[in-house]
Amino acid sequence: MYTDKFATKPGELKWSLEILPPTLGKTVDDVCATLDQLLEYHPIGIEVTYHQEKIVSKNENGMQIGYPLRRNPGTVPLCSYLKGYYHGKDDVEITPHLICGGFSIKECEEALIDLNVANIRTVLALRGDPQDLEKGFVPHPEGHHHASGLVEQIVNLNNGKYLFPIEDPTPTKFCIGVAGYPDKHYEAPNRDYDMQMLKNKVDKGADYIVTQMFFDTKNYFAFVEKARKVGIKIPIVPGIKPLDSKKQLTVLPRKFHIELPQELVEMTLSQDDAAVKQIGIEWAVAQCKELLYYGVPALHFYSMNKAAPIKEILKKLV
Ligand code: FAD
């Protein structure tokens, strides 16, 4: 189980990384170039995001038409490739994100079967973001409405229950991660409701939680405390993202529905991008040190495929 790799005592540094599959037209080499720079710090896990098709505008004979495009394709084959790439180099868990959005339940099962054949043992089960934020999430007509449905489906496979009953199947052994939101999921009416929905995913069979990025460490500790109070006992891995540019002061809250502490905003407002990058690294290091001091299963870094800031942070933690 991936969770067996987690830290067992405060101060023990275990860390994982989230990467994006290559942008359409780019190659796996670009992704590996990021990973190669961080390997010496021994990650316990690498997670690969999943991206639904988005309708983009395409010019055809002078007319703008909508065109469904996957800008970052290849999560499942990339995970299979990385599994081979890391074989023997380190004990790195390769974890694909699987989303409900855009997929029927049958297609979810097909993806899980492919992953099982590729010997992938951990999956992060997500609902996925809406195609268009304005319209909200629209499930596939034959798909799951919530991540909890996908968790249930994976648990069924772990119990040898396929959609089409097969004789004497070998049960899959997926370790299941789900998402949690210290700053609350943007659709949830309040934190208590959101926590109940998280508890529902755990009750269905999730093995660990990875949190959305947060910049106020107090929010993570409050989130964990609340989770323990409602009976969630599984590990809760904090998500860390170093602020990378001034633009992110507005982009991150808009895109990820998170809050930036006033102190961080004041520190960065009058600075240029190079200074903001440095402040972002220092802020993340302080967050990581506090989290490690009190004890966390692992630190999960949102890399956006940039190795340098993560490397700077890790240098200051080891
Ligand atoms: P859910 O758990 O289904 O929750 C969605 C909303 O519905 C919440 O408000 C919740 O409170 C509510 N809810 C849940 N269950 C029920 C229920 N049974 N009845 C009523 N309401 C319910 N997106 C991608 O597209 N690709 C990725 O690779 C990706 N990776 C991510 C990784 C992490 C660690 C995180 C934190 C997020 C990631 N996301 C990704 C974004 C994620 O898909 C969005 O935040 C999405 O809006 C919610 O996903 P979820 O799995 O938390 O959904």
Image (spheres, rainbow, N blue to C red):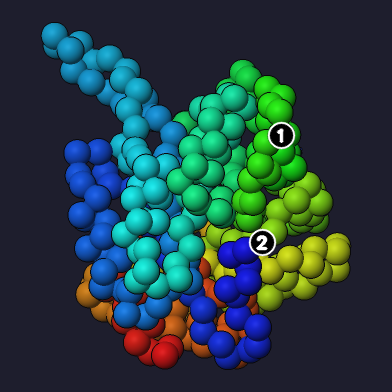
Closer-to-camera residue (111/277): 111
Q: Quadrant of residue 26?
A: top left
Instruction: Say which amino acid is labelled 1.
Output: Asp
Q: Few, some or many C-alpha atoms within 10 Å of disc 2 (few <14, some 14-19, many ≥20)?
A: many
Q: Residue at 63% of width from left, 67% of height from top?
A: 3
- Would you say 36 lies left or right of 169 here? left
Label 1: element kind: loop
Q: Residue at 69% of width from left, 59% of height from top?
A: 207
Q: Residue at 35% of width from left, 56% of height from top?
A: 84
Q: Which residue is mark 1?
A: 168
Image location of residue 209, percent across then percent down: 65, 60
Q: Who comes first in sequence, dot 2 or dot 1? A: 1
Which quadrant is home to the N terminus? bottom right
Label 2: element kind: strand
Closer-to-camera residue (185/266): 185
Instruction: Say which amino acid is labelled 2.
Output: Tyr
Image location of residue 150, percent across then percent down: 66, 39
Q: CA distance from mark 2 to mark 1?
A: 29 Å
- Would you say 311 lies left or right of 285 here? left
Is any atom of residue 89 visible in this view?
yes
- Would you say 100 lies left or right of 197 here? left
Q: Residue at 64% of width from left, 51% of height from top?
A: 173
Q: Which residue is mark 2?
A: 208
